[in-house]
Image (cartoon, rainbow, N blue to C red):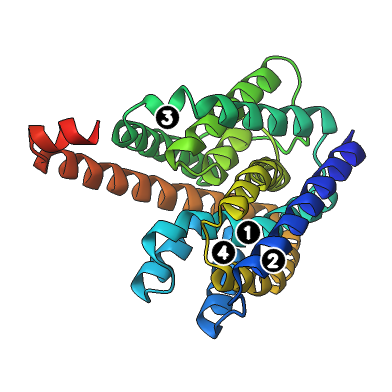
Amino acid sequence: MRRALLVVLVLFAAWFAIEFVRGVTRMGSWRPRPIESLTGFVTVFFDTFGIGSFATTTAVFRAWRVVPDELIPGTLNVGHMITSVMGAVIFIQLVPVEPLTLVPMIASSGLGAWLGAGIVARLPRHKVRLGMGLALSAAASIMLLSQLHLLPGGRDAAGLHGAPLVVAVVGNFILGGLMTLGIGLYAPCMILVSLLGMNPRAAFPIMMGSCAFLMTISGTRFVRAQRFQPSAAVGLTLGGIPALLIAALVVKSLPLDAVRWLVVFVVFYTALTLVEAGRRELASLRQRTPVDLEAST
């Protein structure tokens, strides 16, 4: 089952690579600038640890005016696609996770994202962000107390069975749907598997495999629509590949206790960014007049 998953993932990646090369050839001006490649290296390195590459890349692009705002979403999906697939392939082979846990969780996230485009995306985004931020803060607090030996610690299982597996599959389905609202999957997936008693490292192949399948489809659509900046997308790809290989070796060699502390840090960081994003969006909505709101709908 694991081998079949890798074959399907590689086929998806090959399909995307062909579309990517055709797209940048048609659009021209694809040679990356140093800032674009450096952005790829830094963001992918920290992305491998679960920080998330989209928010950090967006911040750099906007601060240095590298990519026009309207092309940022497509550039992110296209430029980080290859490293996302590579990360999935590397961690699926490096980190032991039972196939009967790995495959259903990845498949459920894909189904959640597909359905989420029509269902979950109708929810008010600021409420989802605030709710997710508070929920992640509570979950990270539980892990922190366990790390401080104030609560019973989790287990180091490589897979789940019975009710915990059902919870994990349903949970990843929901997280896949929330991705359509701009809610990252990495940190929530880390906390989900950890609280269910799995080895925190198990989150890496699950979260990367989930995002790799999702981004293959979305990235191809952006390429065909020519809604991305070729030079920035190529820069993110070329800069991200060595960063991914270096970070993968670091993650593999980290002691398990250090990985647990890393999970706590990442989840707290993600929770704070979600709450802040939700607060800003709510404040923006309150400042808008009824005429603005009616026009936007």
Decide which of tag 3 and tag 2 comes sooner along the chain.
Answer: 3
Asked if the residues shown at circle 2 and circle 1 are in contact, with their CB atoms under 8 angstroms apart, the answer is: yes
Mark 4–mark 2 distance (CA, rounded to whole Å)? 9 Å
What element does badge 4 sit on? helix
What element does badge 1 sit on? helix
- Residue type (three-letter) at the residue carrying disc 4: Phe
Is 253 rendered above or below residue 107? Answer: below
Mark closer to the observer (3, 1): 3
Asked if the residues shown at circle 3 and circle 2 are in contact, with their CB atoms under 8 angstroms apart, the answer is: no
Left or right of 57 in this view: 92: right
Asked if the residues shown at circle 3 and circle 1 are in contact, with their CB atoms under 8 angstroms apart, the answer is: no
Q: Residue furthest bottom?
A: 34
- Residue type (three-letter) at the residue carrying disc 2: Leu
Instruction: Residue 246: give x, y in percent of width and height.
Output: 71, 71
Asked if the residues shown at circle 4 and circle 1 are in contact, with their CB atoms under 8 angstroms apart, the answer is: yes
Decide which of tag 3 and tag 1 comes sooner along the chain.
Answer: 1
Q: Which residue is mark 1?
A: 48
Left or right of 92 in this view: 25: left
On residue 244, which mark appears?
2
Q: Quadrant of the N terminus?
A: top right
* Residue at 70% across, 34% down: 106
Q: Which residue is mark 4?
A: 46
- Residue type (three-letter) at the residue carrying disc 3: Ala
Mark 3–mark 1 distance (CA, rounded to whole Å)? 27 Å
Mark 3: few, some, or many residues within 10 Å (few <14, many ≥20)?
some
Left or right of 113 in this view: 245: right
* Residue at 63% across, 31% down: 109
Mark 2–mark 1 distance (CA, rounded to whole Å)? 7 Å
Q: Which residue is mark 3?
A: 121
What element does badge 3 sit on? helix
Mark 3–mark 2 distance (CA, rounded to whole Å)? 31 Å
